[in-house]
């Protein structure tokens, strides 16, 4: 019996040895070249990120003195991005660039360029964008009419937002939607951003003290927690609200604000889009930005036929010059990796942050650890061991600084947030809205 088993095993081994094993793909070398104004961007030590399309895998390398970064990756489609923050005199300058079409092949040249764009960071940043809604208490679904944005003065100087300061959302509304502004893998615009539907602006100038914030409710400026305990209270009299009932009549998105909200805190708008009874910011993947009109008023800009572009029979966009943009955040929809596409230009946001809706999560800016720790008044006030991120979840992320910004601010610390005009580095997905204490 033993002899038979041994003979049988030998026969199987002989048979399987005749089957040729499948050839495995081997990594190949790929080079990313940084270019600025048609010449090599010869700067050593710039971080370059290569991300796999259709997945969450990414690789990082730094440039050599000639501005080249080398990777060893399997053949496939990738997107590449690079960011450099530097000081020029008293100004903080950011160089950003992306290339969404890095096609690495086994026998190809595999040398790809990233064209870098120069931009300046601003005193005002988007600190938080809460868009995804939260679960209903009875488990029957989710509630989404509680969106808000927080603007933050990221400096030691007082900031004043004038009546020319505007809020806009980029077209198309969702990152995975059909984007008619693409020609192949390239955006058709280079010096403007398409603002969908309408933009909003303040009635009166808004002053923000150093290291302080202002909250703007994009839906109801009411206490949403009275009905949904996992939502937020937006009825604070210091808050502002996008509310223009003569233009947007959908009371789900735009209910009457709480009595405590003064009418001077109602933002104004003009709808240049022919359709729609609400300003519907995507709850899963908007490209959101703020800007200031220059040489004109927001109302005049919104009604200028020269800046309006009809995308289709139901959509009209206003062309906002990139030079007007103060800050922006590109959000990609979780689990739609193969379909997500950039809408904001590299000068505004060279990256993206991935988001999962309906769970009460929020998008929160990361702390600039070095700059925050360098403030002498912060000694003994910073709280470390941040646990508010979602890095343990699929498509989750956290703040790599390890500083708990909200706890530190409550301690009296002054927070300086990271601002590289690249949401891949600047933002993370937080478990809970910061307004939920």
Image (spheres, grey):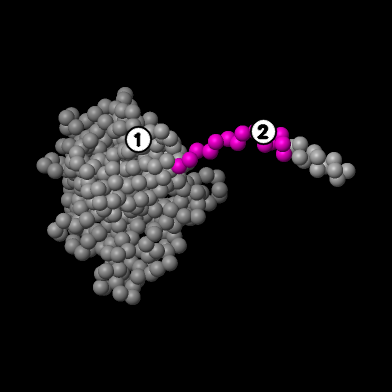
Task: Please tell me whether residue 91 belongs to the stretch shown in magenta.
Answer: no
- Residue 345 screen position, x and y as percent: 27, 40
- How dense is the environment of label 1, judged by Cα within 10 Å: few (below 14), some, or many (20 and up)? few
Residue 219 in the figure: left or right of residue 89: right
Task: Determine which residue is flagged by label 1.
Answer: 109
Dot 2, how many residues are within 10 Å of its Cα: few (below 14), some (14-19), or many (20+)?
few
User: Measured from the top left, where is residue 390 in percent x and y?
Assistant: 46, 55
Magenta region, residue range = 13-27
Quarter of the image containing the N terminus?
top right
Mark yes or no: residue 406 visible. no
Identify which residue is drawn at 24% across, 58% down: 153
- Residue 85 appears in which quarter of the rendering? bottom left
Dot label at residue 18: 2
Task: Please report whichever mark, 2 or 1, sits nearer to the chain's N-terminal start.
Answer: 2
Q: Position of residue 365 (x, y in %)?
A: 34, 55
Image location of residue 160, percent across then percent down: 18, 56
Q: Is residue 30 visible?
A: yes
Eye-nearest disc, 2 or 1: 2
Side (left or right) of 38 relative to 137:
left
Comparing 27 with 360, the one in front is 27
Where disc 2 sits, the SS reads: loop
Residue located at (69% from left, 36% from top): 16
Q: Residue at x 33, y 67 (%)?
A: 409
Could you say whether the residue bearing mark 1 is in a helix, strand or loop? loop
């Amino acid at each position: 019996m033993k002899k038979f088993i041994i003979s049988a095993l030998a026969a199987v081994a002989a048979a399987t040895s005749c089957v040729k094993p499948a050839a495995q793909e081997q990594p190949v070398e790929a080079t990313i070249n940084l270019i600025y104004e048609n010449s090599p961007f010869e700067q050593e030590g710039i971080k370059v990120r290569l991300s796999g399309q259709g997945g969450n895998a990414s690789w990082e390398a730094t440039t050599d003195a000639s501005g080249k970064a080398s990777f060893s990756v399997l053949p496939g489609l990738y997107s590449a991005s690079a960011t450099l923050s530097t000081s020029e005199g008293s100004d903080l300058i950011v160089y950003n660039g992306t290339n969404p079409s890095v096609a690495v092949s086994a026998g190809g040249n595999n040398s790809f360029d990233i064209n870098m764009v120069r931009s300046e960071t601003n005193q005002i940043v988007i600190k938080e964008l809460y868009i995804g809604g939260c679960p209903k208490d009875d488990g029957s679904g989710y509630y989404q009419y509680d969106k808000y944005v927080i603007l933050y003065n990221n400096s030691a100087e007082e900031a004043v937002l004038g009546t020319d300061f505007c809020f806009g959302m980029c077209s198309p509304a969702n990152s995975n939607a059909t984007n008619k502004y693409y020609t192949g893998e390239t955006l058709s615009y280079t010096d403007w951003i398409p603002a969908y539907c309408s933009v909003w602006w303040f009635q009166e100038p808004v002053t923000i003290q150093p290291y302080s914030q202002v909250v703007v409710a994009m839906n109801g400026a009411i206490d949403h927690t009275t009905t949904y305990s996992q939502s937020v209270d937006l009825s604070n009299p210091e808050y502002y609200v996008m509310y223009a009932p003569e233009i947007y009549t959908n009371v789900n998105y735009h209910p009457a604000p709480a009595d405590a909200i003064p009418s001077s805190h109602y933002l104004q708008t003009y709808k240049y889009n022919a359709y729609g009874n609400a300003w519907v910011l995507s709850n899963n993947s908007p490209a959101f930005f703020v800007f200031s009109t220059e040489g004109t008023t927001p109302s005049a800009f919104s009604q200028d036929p020269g800046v309006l572009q009809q995308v289709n029979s139901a959509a009209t966009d206003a062309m906002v010059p990139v030079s007007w943009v103060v800050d922006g955040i590109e959000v990609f929809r979780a689990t739609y990796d193969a379909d997500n596409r950039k809408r904001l230009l590299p000068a505004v946001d060279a990256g993206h942050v991935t988001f999962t809706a309906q769970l009460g999560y929020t998008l929160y800016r990361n702390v600039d650890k070095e700059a925050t720790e360098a403030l002498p008044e912060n000694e003994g006030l910073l709280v470390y061991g941040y646990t508010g991120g979602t890095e343990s979840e699929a498509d989750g992320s956290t703040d790599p600084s390890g500083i708990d910004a909200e706890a530190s601010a409550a301690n009296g610390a002054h927070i300086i947030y990271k601002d590289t005009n690249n949401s891949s580095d600047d933002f993370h997905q937080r478990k809970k809205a910061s307004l939920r204490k």
